[in-house]
Amino acid sequence: MANFFKASPKKTQIQQQLTVNIRHLDQQGCGVAFQGKKPIFIEGALPNETVEVKLYEQKSKFSKAKLLKVITASPNRAEVMCRHYFQCGGCNLQHMDYQSQLTYKQDKITKLFSRQALNELMPWQNPIVSDPWHYRRKARIGVQYNKRGEPIVGFRQRESNHLTEIKSCPVLVEAFNNIFAELKDILAKVSGKNAIGHVEIIAANENVVLVRQLVKLTAQDKQLWQSFSSKNEWLVYFDDGKSLTPLMEDKTLSYSLTDAIKIEFSVDNFIQVNHLVNNKMVEQAQTWLMLNENDVVLDLFCGLGNFSLPIAQKVSSVVGIEGVMSMVNKAQENAQKNGISNCQFYQADLNSDWQNELWVQQKYTKVLLDPARAGAYQALTQLLTCKVSKILYVSCDPASLARDAKLLIDHGYKIEKIALMDMFSQTKHVETMVMFSL
């Protein structure tokens, strides 16, 4: 069969500069303007602003443009706190004042519910907030090396796999104010450079630096890391892809949940990144559920017992279900160490069929669930057969929440209360608590 030459289509000219008016923000926090009927997405622009932009990508249905100049600024525009903001991909709402960030996030949830044809009145409650700066107690810091072999330490650039070299980060807790300079210094000295992929930091009762290093630590490198640890009073652990090993001693990590409850965790366990919002969230969950001593509560996706343990102090019993066995064991240990005997934990894949599990046979009066971003559609489908009168849904993704809310509402549930939880201020990420009742 003959092959015929086919000319490649010419690339669309993408260096065009335009002056446009911003209509609204999209779900990712980008300003949206229009060139004819085609939308243009512009990071850093706000509604009702007139801005000068340069197109850098054109598709048949949309374009992307870089913000060059704000000609007419929105009254909601704020001065950014971070010197790396316009390169780093970690935050994307610093240019918006904090109250406007909360309004945007609440509107984002409302619009997603509307797309599911859920147009009933949204009974919004006051949002759960903390200080919008220096709140993040857990983060992953990337490590790369330039052509000269010098370390680059920071976060991913926007729309890129390359790192922005970070000097400081105003959303990290102050315990790690100097982490970037300290890491850059030691990474320039250690021998296993290319083997270090990233570093995780955790602030709790102890401050932890977890180094992802796939090669064995040399004696000289161990001394360098010991000096690093002692100087900064940070515990150092190493992850070789198979196990986690402390540099020196393995201390118990924990955070206070209430005056009476302390949650212990391991360096590889999930914990919420915003300590204050987490504590307020747990307190509000108890209030909304209107707990009493006769309640039997089912806590799905329970993790380490973050909700289960304080709830157990106010009810007859709690059953917590978690997919990761190590966290189930840790939750049970947390119950024992906090002197809580009416709380049991089981392992189950809640996205599979769990109707024949023994814990399902119990009669529950109330349910709490806190799933990952994918949501809890499969779990809710099975939970509907239990006909529990109150379901408290804690969500970290508004799109899956809207989908799951439609399932519950289609089966007779009503939204009793809904509130934004600003776990990640200065970013587009949204967390929500919803109280459903029959």
Image: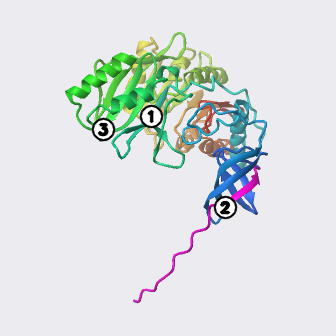
The reply to whether callout 2 and callout 3 are in contact (CB within 8 Å) is: no
Q: Position of residue 396 (x, y in %)?
A: 57, 36
Q: In the figure, 298 relative to 414: above or below?
A: above
Q: Residue furthest front?
A: 148
Residue 284 or 256: which is nearer the viewer? 256
User: According to the image, label 3 marks what residue?
Assistant: 193
Neighbour class for label 2 at 10 Å: few (<14), some, many (≥20)? few
Secondary structure character of the magenta stretch overall: loop
**Circle 2: residue type:** Gln
Q: Nearer the viewer, mark 1 or mark 3?
A: 3
Looking at marks 1 and 3 on the same chain, the residue that comes earlier in the sequence is marked by 1
User: According to the image, label 1 marks what residue?
Assistant: 140
- The chosen color scheme is rainbow
Whether residue 187 appears in this view of the structure is yes
Give the secondary structure at mark 3: helix
Image disc number at residue 16: 2
What residue is shown at x 64% (from left), y 58% (from top)? 55
Q: In the figure, 202 relative to 197: above or below?
A: above
Give the secondary structure at mark 1: strand
Looking at marks 2 and 1 on the same chain, the residue that comes earlier in the sequence is marked by 2
**Circle 3: residue type:** Lys
Q: Which residues are magenta?
A: 1-22
Q: Nearer the viewer, mark 2 or mark 3?
A: 2
Q: Position of residue 71 (x, y in %)?
A: 76, 46
Residue 170 or 207: which is nearer the viewer? 170
Whether residue 241 appears in this view of the structure is no
The reply to whether callout 1 and callout 3 are in contact (CB within 8 Å) is: no
Q: Please indicate whether residue 173 sits to the left or right of residue 13 in the image.
A: left
Give the secondary structure at mark 2: loop
Neighbour class for label 1 at 10 Å: few (<14), some, many (≥20)? some
Q: In the figure, 280 relative to 358: above or below?
A: above
